[in-house]
Amino acid sequence: MNYKYHLDKSSKKFQCPNCQKKTFVRYVDAEQNQYLESHIGRCDRESKCAYHLTPKGNQPINTIPENVVAVKPSFHEQTIIKMIGKDYMNNNFVKYLLKKFVPVDVKEVIHKYRIGTSKFWKGATVFLQIDENVDIHSGKVMLYDANTGKRVKKPFNCITWLHRVLQINDFVLQQCLFGLHLLTDCNTKTIGIVESEKTAIEMSIYRRDIIWIATGSKSNFKEKLLMPLNGRKIIAYPDKTEYESWNKTAIELRKKGYDITCSMLLEKHGCEDGDDLVDFLFGNDKVA
């Protein structure tokens, strides 16, 4: 259903009125095809900021106005896989994996998830979002600490998109789940859904009987992105404190025929807020 106001679907971000970071997505008037007031929107820093001001009087509209043209999503060329698929010995995330797992397993997940390297920040990692048709929707560029495996957030949050790094103009970002291309590997395995790409990759080594997929953010656990998984057995493992939100979505999806459950594992075992499945299984400093 189309609504009068919706969050901007482009990759453009503004300064958040709350945290002052350039992570703010503004609402658009679909009928006028223009932004609403500068303070009406949602900050992408869902855990650290969580600012979200919705417009008043948002109502469904039956038709798309003639002056609004549907924009097709952009895709990266397949050659991007080869372009970013090198220099792994200088990739901080790969260095971290090699501290926890044997080299043969690390090599396998690099190929499996098409992990890439970027020089945008020295040692940065690229996580490609590749769908079930092997179309490359996007590449998330992130910098990790090679020793701890934690994201580098100081002096600023080191996360951006590959199309920005490559300065591709007018790139229309439409995300898909990370690891979605692995559905074709086996049509009988259970699907495990976690939030972070890092967690999906580590869990794919620890539990090979499950296909591990990541949402990339807590707000991406929604039917629009989960639709390709319909017909498969799905177990969602939300980060600590996100169970109620994810379980609410899972309940709605079950009503529509999805075979999906939401695990309370982290809620039951006294994990700290923000912990994920890897934190629970390995601890922050443990080696597998």
Image: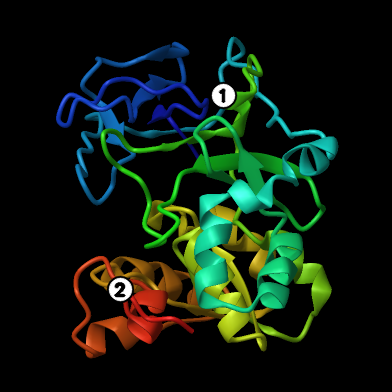
How far across and down, in percent of the image, does residue 217 sit? 42, 53
Q: In the shown orientation, is residue 268 left or right of residue 257?
A: left
Residue 264 visible, this angle: no
Name the one closer to the observer, 44 or 104.
Answer: 104
- Dot 1: what SS? helix
- Dot 2: what SS? helix
Name the one closer to the observer, 288 or 190.
Answer: 288
Amino acid at pointer 1: Arg
How far across and down, in percent of the image, does residue 40 sit? 24, 25
Residue at horizontal 80 percent and vertical 79 percent from the top: 186
**Residue 224, placed above or below residue 69:** below
State which quadrant residue 67 falls in.
Answer: top right
Residue behind mark 1: 164
Query: Which callout, 1 or 2, points at the residue further toward the start of the chain?
Result: 1
Mark drawn on residue 74 = none
Q: In the shown orientation, is residue 22 left or right of residue 250?
A: left
Q: In the shown orientation, is residue 71 left or right of residue 123?
A: right
How far across and down, in percent of the image, does residue 263 sit? 39, 84
Amino acid at pointer 2: Tyr
How far across and down, in percent of the image, does residue 212 sit? 60, 73
Residue at horizontal 40 percent and vertical 21 percent from the top: 28
**Residue 257, placed above or below residue 198:** below
Asked if labels 2 and 1 touch by Cβ distance under 8 angstroms, the answer is: no
Residue behind mark 2: 243
- For the residues marked 1 and 2, what is the alpha-carbon distance in whole angstroms? 33 Å
State which quadrant residue 141 falls in.
Answer: top right
